[in-house]
Amino acid sequence: MEQEFVTVASLKEWIEQKNIRKIRELFDEYHVVDVTELVQQLSLAEIIFLFKVVKRDVTAEVFTYLDQEKKEELIQAFSGPDIKIMLENIYSDDIVDFIEDMPANLTKKILASATESTRKEINLLLSFPENSAGSIMSTDFVELKVTDTVQQAINKIKRQGKMAETINTCYVIDEKRQLVGTIRLREFLFENREDKIQDIMATDVVSVVTDQDQEDVANVIKKYDITVVPVVNNENRLIGIITVDDIMDILEEEATEDIHKMAAVTPMEDSYLEASVWEIVKSRLPWLLILMISGSFTGAIISGYEVELMKIPALAGFIPMIMGTAGNAGSQASTMVIRGIAVDGLQTKDVFKVLRKELLIALTCSVVLFSVNFIRISVFPSELVAASNVILVALTVALSVVLALTIGKLLGGFLPLFVCALKLDPAAVAAPVITTLVDACSLFIYFQIAVFFLGV
Amino acid sequence: MEQEFVTVASLKEWIEQKNIRKIRELFDEYHVVDVTELVQQLSLAEIIFLFKVVKRDVTAEVFTYLDQEKKEELIQAFSGPDIKIMLENIYSDDIVDFIEDMPANLTKKILASATESTRKEINLLLSFPENSAGSIMSTDFVELKVTDTVQQAINKIKRQGKMAETINTCYVIDEKRQLVGTIRLREFLFENREDKIQDIMATDVVSVVTDQDQEDVANVIKKYDITVVPVVNNENRLIGIITVDDIMDILEEEATEDIHKMAAVTPMEDSYLEASVWEIVKSRLPWLLILMISGSFTGAIISGYEVELMKIPALAGFIPMIMGTAGNAGSQASTMVIRGIAVDGLQTKDVFKVLRKELLIALTCSVVLFSVNFIRISVFPSELVAASNVILVALTVALSVVLALTIGKLLGGFLPLFVCALKLDPAAVAAPVITTLVDACSLFIYFQIAVFFLGV
């Protein structure tokens, strides 16, 4: 957090001078996340030297914060025994994180170098479906027995605790290895060393099951304000833990995915700068094509009223404003409802509350939009409109705007909930469907009203 | 987590029967968050009875999870001494959370009932600007001195720890009360009781300053993978802590705000169902009006080419598709860049990388969109197009689509970064500006190309 931080140049100099004391001081003094930002900029040879002179547990942590590319270079360069020792100092969920993105030959090298028990853990975690609780959990936790005394538990924590991701909460299992309680580390400071764990543990255990979706896990952690949640299998046996730091990344990813979907972009794995052009094209092009069809459909409606447009050419000039307002009203409503479904528990059964609300909103907005348009068009008429027609054109446009707005709001409120009831993803499906429907409806209404009022 | 959970009806029955044993069992057996969901549905009189027979620290926790409305009813009903005892069992950040939204008379009642020290803490927290670290922090933490021994520290933790939000990390201050180190609770189990705290504490302390924005705080917690961050004032004196559960709520709020802004909705305090119609109208109507002006502007361009449209009426039918594709391409690019700025550290200096990428994406998409449109229009021509003009119309439309697409992508990539350089909020400003510019440019290009190829 200090203002003057070590530069990459000085670190490179220390490495060249083999100034081991300075290098170790750097790691003692600064946070490993900050130091890793420097290490990231070193050459492979420099990093390898660094890894040889700094403590194993520290370099293992540095490794987990490096870019995937640097990680692959290092795994390539390391010997089997080097990798083995490093793996012993990294949490299992972090190992799986970088293994998943590595080429097959490096994955093989890692698994071949790992100890039997680490290899088993890695394979277990890799066996769960993507985005499930099992795939993001860590197997590094402290497990106590109901029959343990406080003193026995403390001894276990001293043994197992070094490599546990957190020991602030420890988990208690019974003789069938089922999860039956939790105990906070602080209790061990306060309780009598002869007490039995089962007498002091909390039994209102919140847990998730291995095949639950990671979004569920995030919701559980948020709901109960906890920083770690135990993962059990279908027999309620404890097999892992998920910590809140991983959940924060997931919440952010999910929000990004929803935002991308609403803008008609298929979610991608990589960030914008990391993703290749081809990857981005694949995530955008299909939607451009789908929405182009929607555009052609709307165009066909305009072509269908060709004759009317020829008679009163001024009508064409209002098309963008009417379609635009309908589309904006629709996306305002659908976005709020889609986000409400994602974070505030809005459900299909709320559909009437939503429609009622959107109708009232539409009516209120309509008063303003009708007045603005009617006044603007009748006071400053286009030269293209015959004087005798000005009021009728103003009425046609103003009425069309508010009807299009109302349809946009109602469809925007209704469709995400409907799509949700079909067990589809509202963020992905609702936007293109709403655009197509709202555009088509608003144009149809406009031309029908024009035919009615202007007799074209 | 059990399948069969107690129903509200049985809880109401127990209260009527004054079955205190059953009620206390309920709170022992289930998680307070789940029990509160039941309590939320009770009448005021029932809740008051419940609060009398259940332990103070448990009811205080129940209180923090109740709806704001129920909280206000209870504060109204409680006597001063009741409130005082309850406040002593609630973390200061949670107290401030519900005080901020209460009517002035209830806030007064709460402050009048609080002890001197609680009142001071509340007033301190209320004095920080909204969304600053100071306004969301809690003052309930454990503070140790560098000169303490492990044994002295444990005694302090036993005294202060009961009401601390977390004691998993304790903070160490020097004689000037400046924050100089942290120590994890687990060390106390492992270290010798005669050791000095200053010899075993970690000195690479990550902290935030009271007036830093809450988004900064979230970024610090994410970057360093920590579950609690200390808050210091400008003299580096420790005055509070912020825990990760509050940060999760903030991350979600910020994502919702960005999503709403991108859909042209001004962010609101309340969730969709809680917000009044009037509140939602206020957050949407201004944008509808602004975007309507943009639509009128586009309409003016169409009216300007009235003569050309009269000559080849089929041209009008392609307007929605060309404008739509340009708009979608623009929002795809701008959304990815805006989100990249928010979460992946995309900066104004990356503008050339972004433009290069968007140009390549546009070129790749163009190959497909050009072919699809050219083939579709020349193979299935509209009846409105004269046979001699078919190829020229197909060429005009296909070329316009890809040029509009390219402009959309480039503007969508450029504008958010430009807005960011002006220190404005890209999510709020970029969307309407991009819509207006992209719509206008794409139409202008379309009509110019039509004039060129078709000589209209």
Image (spheres, coloured by chain):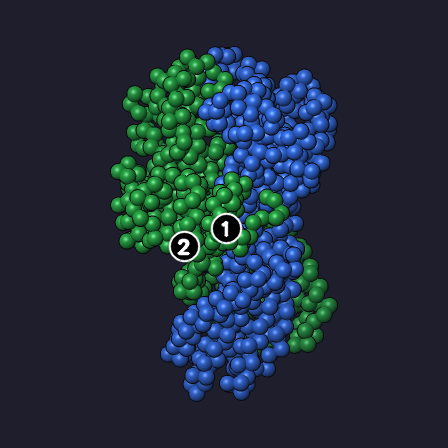
Chain colours: A blue, B green
Q: Is residue B275 above or below residue B300?
A: above
* Residue at point 61%, 44% (across, down): B2
Q: Is residue B148 above or below residue A133?
A: above
Q: Chain of mark 2?
A: B
* Residue at point 47%, 27% (across, down): A186
| Residue highlighted by disc 2 | B45
Report which quarter residue A365 is drawn in.
bottom left
**Real-space Cα distance between discs 2 and 1?**
14 Å
* Residue at point 32%, 42% (across, down): B84
Report which quarter residue A89 is drawn in.
top right
Q: Is residue B405 visible?
A: no
| Residue highlighted by disc 1 | B14
User: Residue B247, how many percent across, how many down?
Assistant: 45, 41
* Residue at point 41%, 31% (across, down): B162
Disc 1 secondary structure class: helix
Amino acid carrying label 2: it is Ala
